[in-house]
Image: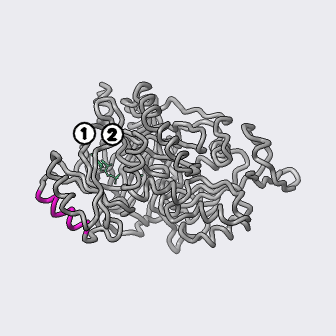
Amino acid sequence: MAKIIVMYPTDCSKETVDWKQIQGQHITDVVRNILVLGSGGREHALAWKLAQSTGAKVYVAPGNAGTAEVGVNVNIKVGDFEKIAEFCLEKEISLVVVGPEQPLVDGIVDYFKADEKLRDICIIGPDSRGAQLEGSKAFAKVFMEKNGIPTARCLTVNKDRLNEGIAFLRSLKAPYVLKADGLAAGKGVLIIDSLEEAERELGNMLEGKFGAASATVVIEEFLKGIEVSVFVLTDGEHYVLLPEAKDYKRIGDGDTGLNTGGMGAVSPVPFCTEDFLQKVEKRIVEPTLKGLKEAQIDYKGFIFLGLMNCGGDPYVIEYNVRMGDPETEAVMTRIEGDFADMLYACAVGCLDKVHYAKSEKTAVTVMLVSGGYPEAYEKGKVMTGMDQVNHGVAFHAGTSFNAEGQVVTSGGRVIAVTAQGDSIEEARNIAYAEVKKITFDGENHRSDIGLDLMKLTGEC
Ligand code: AMP
Ligand code: GLY
């Protein structure tokens, strides 16, 4: 039975409350200690949203210069489960939100559930078996095939089956999609036009191009369409569809140049009509949850569906077991109500009891990156102008403080500026006006976030 420790601010008395007794009620007059794990724009957006919840005291480990504005940064790495556990007990943390996938794949939820002192802490994310949906592309493909979930045709091979892999490649039409089975820091997918090169790269991957992650490779049919990120929050039994978003992956305007972690986002996505989202629920979300239950995977957390809209029908490109980045920086601004209530309810299995609504506004996020990114770039550039952003939010992605206490760049993706409007055009105009206020040496961003969607909807 899940319990949360609450502290009443009137007399600072503490009480352990059984969540089941107060499920569905909005809690007032309490302090809820929340720990967000991670250090990117996604974690700043999660912490920013959670800090607005009643009684929330937010800690972020390790955090960045932006999370320090909405919570307290704690110098602990996301992989250091022992220190995280110690900190949770010391600060009476009642909710842990795991931002990135690696600690989930490495079993942070299993670690908490196996310890009787930690077991009752609400933790958002699947255990290591559930995290295989993202941690192993081969697992995800078998899961989808077993549960009749629409996805690209594929063959999974290892070194011993190179010849079968080549034969399968030859049966497909260009372009060819090769995916490292394991986590490869977002770099493990190759899309190749020539058959010859695809055959060569298949060999290279199986020989360790992406280390152990590509000892197994999923060869996939190429899906033609428009991509969209759909986010589900589930307690294993019930679910809510969070706002969807479109991510812009390439470094250059017009979707040109190298792939990045994401250069911007728009939410909602005009082609995600009611009809399309209903198909997503019926054909993908519901069979996914049913499949997880059948596999006896107790999944309490986010499921991020990377989808391809192929002529109005959704296909799964990938599952992720976390929120997307930079999509979260757009999505969090559109969630209405108390997000902490939603996450506590998720962790204890009463997600059906909480109030959830999304704003009708459009959010546009523009990512400011370091010069040279996604290839080599310099860090430590002093940043200015963030305090001038007053018609939107500047979510920090890769920032830290230097010895003088100035905010400096510390990553490729540096800061994500989000603004809202009644249309994509309005949100874009506001966001780009805010972007101009932030400066640092080498700053670069895309100037066309949302333009393609405006063209699709006739906005321009
Ligand atoms: P991932 O690293 O799994 O996010 O994949 C990177 C990108 O490759 C995706 O966002 C898609 O743009 C693209 N991709 C992956 N699989 C396919 C596919 N079967 N057909 C077309 N594009 C794909
Ligand atoms: N924006 C894509 C991702 O977070 O994987």
Q: Nearer the viewer, residue 132 or 52?
A: 132
Would the CB of label 2 be found within 8 Å of ligand 1? yes
Q: SS of the residue at dot 2?
A: strand
Q: Please give the range of residues in magenta.
A: 196-206
Q: Is residue 54 visible?
A: yes
Q: Residue at coordinates 37% horizontally, 42% vertically from top-left? A: 316
Q: Decide: few, some or many residues near mark 2? Use Cα within 10 Å; few <14, some 14-19, many ≥20.
A: many
Q: Amino acid at mark 2?
A: Met
Dot 2 or dot 1: first in sequence order is 1
Which numbered marker is on residue 120? none
The secondary structure that dominates the magenta segment is helix
Q: Residue at coordinates 44% horizontally, 47% vertically from top-left? A: 417
Residue 431 in percent (x, y) is at 42, 41
What distance separates the C-alpha of mark 2 from that of mark 1?
Answer: 8 Å
Q: Nearer the viewer, residue 24 or 457?
A: 24
Which residue is label 1 attached to?
224
Q: Is residue 65 visible?
A: no
Check the image and report above or below for 99 versus 290.
Answer: below
Residue 275 in percent (x, y) is at 41, 25
**Are the residues flagged by discs 2 and 1 in contact, CB closer than 8 Å?**
yes
Mark count? 2
Which residue is label 2 attached to?
308
Residue 277 in percent (x, y) is at 44, 30
Would you say residue 200 sits in the magenta stretch?
A: yes
Check the image and report above or below for 190 versus 425.
Answer: below
Q: Nearer the viewer, residue 378 or 315?
A: 315
Q: Amino acid at mark 1?
A: Lys
Would the CB of label 1 be found within 8 Å of ligand 1? yes
